[in-house]
Image: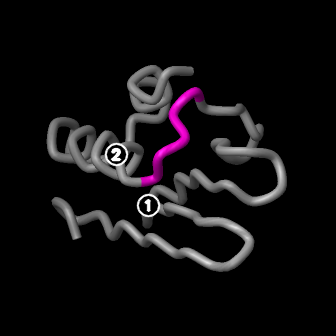
């Protein structure tokens, strides 16, 4: 938990996913490389730990997911 957001990291044999609730912001590596949902925009960052750190820093700063800002911070 960061602020009042739950960050879920899940890893399977097929890939990994990071989901922020209740914002329902999702980044995963299933099927199409590392991408953001819902549009499947591919990220230049491939390391899930680095992505996790960027998301956590963003939430600490903003108090929630501000999707446009977070996408820029992730390199989109």
Towards the viewer: 46 or 67: 46
Work out whether 40 lies above or below 21.
Answer: above
> Which quarter of the figure has residue 44?
top right
**How far apart, in angstroms, are the residues tagged by discs 2 and 1?**
9 Å
Q: Quadrant of residue 55?
A: top left
Q: Which residues are magenta?
A: 44-48
Q: Judge left or right: residue 6 versus residue 76.
A: left
Task: Please name the residue shown 16% across and 60% down the image.
Answer: 3
Q: Nearer the viewer, mark 2 or mark 1?
A: 2
In depth, the one of 62 and 17 nearer the eye is 17
Q: Are marks 2 and 1 in contact (CB under 8 Å)?
A: yes
Near mark 1 (Cα within 10 A), the count class, few <14, some 14-19 or many ≥20, is many
> Where residue 5 is drawn, which disc sits there?
none
Q: Which residue is mark 1?
A: 20
Badge 2 crowding class, 10 Å Cα cut-off, few under 14, some 14 to 19, many 20 or more, is many
In the figure, residue 4 lies in which quadrant? bottom left
Residue ranking furthest to the bottom: 12
In the image, residue 65 above or below residue 9? above
Query: Given the current orientation, which residue lies at the most extreme right position?
Result: 31
Q: Position of residue 74 (x, y in %)?
A: 45, 29
**In the figure, 5 relative to 74: above or below?**
below
Q: Where residue 36 sits: x, y (%)?
A: 64, 43
Q: Secondary structure at mark 1?
A: strand
**Horizontal arrangement in the rendering, residue 57 relative to residue 52 (left or right):** left
**What kind of secondary structure does the magenta stretch mostly adopt?**
loop
Query: Could you say whether the residue bearing mark 2 is in a helix, strand or loop?
Result: helix
Q: Quadrant of the C terminus?
A: top right
Residue at image x 44%, y 65%? 22
Q: Look at mark 2 in the image and give the residue it sits on.
A: 55
């Amino acid at each position: 938990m960061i602020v009042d957001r739950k960050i879920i990291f899940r890893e399977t044999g097929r890939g990994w996913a990071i989901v922020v609730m209740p914002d329902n912001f999702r980044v995963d590596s299933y099927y199409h490389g590392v991408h953001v949902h819902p549009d499947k925009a591919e990220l230049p960052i491939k390391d899930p730990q680095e992505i996790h750190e960027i998301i956590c820093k963003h939430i600490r700063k903003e108090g929630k997911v501000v999707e446009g800002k977070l996408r820029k911070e992730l390199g989109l």
